[in-house]
Image: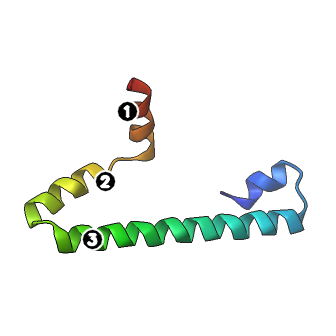
Amino acid sequence: MKRSFLRELGLKKEIIDKIMRENGRDIETAKSRADMYKDQVNTEFSPGTQKTIRKYTEITYSEMCDYMEEK
């Protein structure tokens, strides 16, 4: 999320700061969970399985949306 987008919506700086802090917390939580899953994959699966998992986790958000629309 970008501050410029929120400014264009006419939000005050104080509100934007609160939104950005909360968004930052969400991002850090997601990163932490992703790191945890990566660590789990690296310790619990064989190198071949790890390669397959990485192949499917490197999908872009756009590709995922396209896939979900097909279902």
Q: Report the amino acid beneath label 1.
A: Tyr
Give the percent coordinates (x, y) of residue 51: 16, 59
Specify the farthest residue to the front.
Answer: 44
Q: Residues within 10 Å of mark 3 (few under 14, many from 20)?
A: few
Q: Is residue 35 left or right of residue 6?
A: left
Along the line of sight, the residue nearer the viewer: 51 or 9:
51
Q: Is residue 41 left or right of residue 33?
A: left
Find residue 70 and report its image quarter: top left
Q: Report the amino acid beneath label 3.
A: Gln
Check disc 2 and report its element: helix, strand or loop. Answer: helix
- Mark 3 or 1 closer to N-term? 3
Find residue 46 and report its image quarter: bottom left
Location of mark 1 (residue): 67
Give the percent coordinates (x, y) of residue 63: 39, 39
Q: Report the amino acid beneath label 2.
A: Thr
- Mark 2 or 3 closer to N-term? 3
- Disc marking residue 36: none
66 vs 40: above or below: above
Separation of disc 1 and disc 2 at Cα?
13 Å
- Mark 2 or 3, closer to the camera: 3
38 vs 4: above or below: below
Residue at image coords 81%, 63%: 16
Location of mark 3 (residue): 40
Q: Residues within 10 Å of mark 2 (few under 14, many from 20)?
A: few
- Mark 3 or 1, closer to the camera: 3
Give the percent coordinates (x, y) of residue 65: 45, 36
